[in-house]
Image (tube, grey):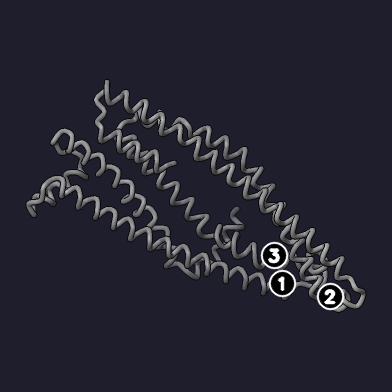
Amino acid sequence: MIRHIRWLWQFYRQHKTVLAVLLLLTPIQAAVQVTIPRMLGFTVDYLRTGVVDDHWLAQIFVNFGEKYEFSVVTSFAIGFVALGFCGFSLYTVFQTSRAWMNCRLEWHFRQHSFDSITLKGPDFYNKYRTGDIVTRLTDDVAEKLSWFACSGIFRTYEALLNIIFVLIMMISIDPGLTFWTAGPLPILIVVFFMSASLLDKRYALLQKKISSFNDIIEACISGIRVVRSYVLEPAQRERFNEAAKERRRAEIDTVKSSRMVDSLYNYIWQFGVVIVLVVGGWRVLFTGLSIGDLATFIYYVVWLV
């Protein structure tokens, strides 16, 4: 693990400014984003009761509106617009930075790999076929390694921050309802570990099929004189068609497995929405939970889904 981090750091240290933007703006954007549902709850409660919540966030916008003689509803509307614009602007900046870093890392990885390959001896090329090398320099670098090295890392970072901030907000509203809402989480963890091995096998098989497909194409093109001299076009066509079918089959199986896992995640989290509606509705009726707080909870749960 440490070895991989050091290897990755040699590329990131050339772009410390972008790295700082990704590290700093992500938690700020997450913090701004999770405050928007609270504004929804404050607005619902005010429209129902005519009383402004004593929460500090509601008081900030109400006091701001009083300076300019705005009504409470107008103050809350300004809060929605301000928080939404701020969150959108921050998300645009670090999302653009992530996309730029993906492309930059792709270039760095390909240059580094190409420089290393040119220094290899005959044993390396005897061990790895040309199709394998082409696959690593194209498909692996562009669509997998560069994406996971930046977006994969920082999307996980963003997701963890969102979950932490949402849970903090939910606990501050109602710890009991938060406990019920987090019920499907252990099931998701079990599903994740069970599906990880399946997806790993699917993607490993797909990589082999892609390498084999590229190797057949490269061998046919580089040896086209031999193919035509011995009239081997039909045999090469058959090999190509068989490799294309195997790659297509592997691609479809991988997509099916990926969609199945994604569906499991989404459907399991739907139980969280049902739990919030049932338990939250009961608490509104019998324990004094406000309609605005329930609306905020529903917003958070749907967001986590």
What residue sits right under mark 3 in the picture?
135
- Nearer the camera: disc 2 or disc 3: 2
Q: In the structure shown, which secondary structural element does the residue marked by tag 1 occupy?
A: helix
Up-down: is 77 above or below 283?
below
- Name which quarter of the figure residue 131 lies in: bottom right
295 relative position to 101: left or right: left
Instruction: Evaluate if marks 1 and 2 touch, with contact meaning CB atoms under 8 Å apart.
Output: no
* Residue sitting at x 13%, y 51%: 64
Question: Residue 225: x, y in percent?
Answer: 86, 79
213 relative position to 81: left or right: right
**Callout 1 amino acid:** Ile
What residue sits right under mark 1 in the picture?
117
Figure disc tally: 3
Q: Quote the CA–CA distance across marks 2 and 3.
A: 19 Å
* Residue sitting at x 15%, y 38%: 52
Instruction: Evaluate if marks 2 and 3 touch, with contact meaning CB atoms under 8 Å apart.
Output: no
The label number, if any, that marks residue 223 in the structure image: 2
Up-down: is 227 above or below 242?
below
Q: Earlier in the sequence, mark 1 or mark 2?
A: 1
Q: In the structure shown, which secondary structural element does the residue marked by tag 3 occupy?
A: helix
**Callout 2 amino acid:** Gly
**Callout 3 amino acid:** Thr
Question: Residue 281: x, y in percent?
Answer: 32, 26
Q: Earlier in the sequence, mark 3 or mark 1?
A: 1
**Quadrant where the image shows the C terminus:** top left
Front-most of 274 and 290? 274
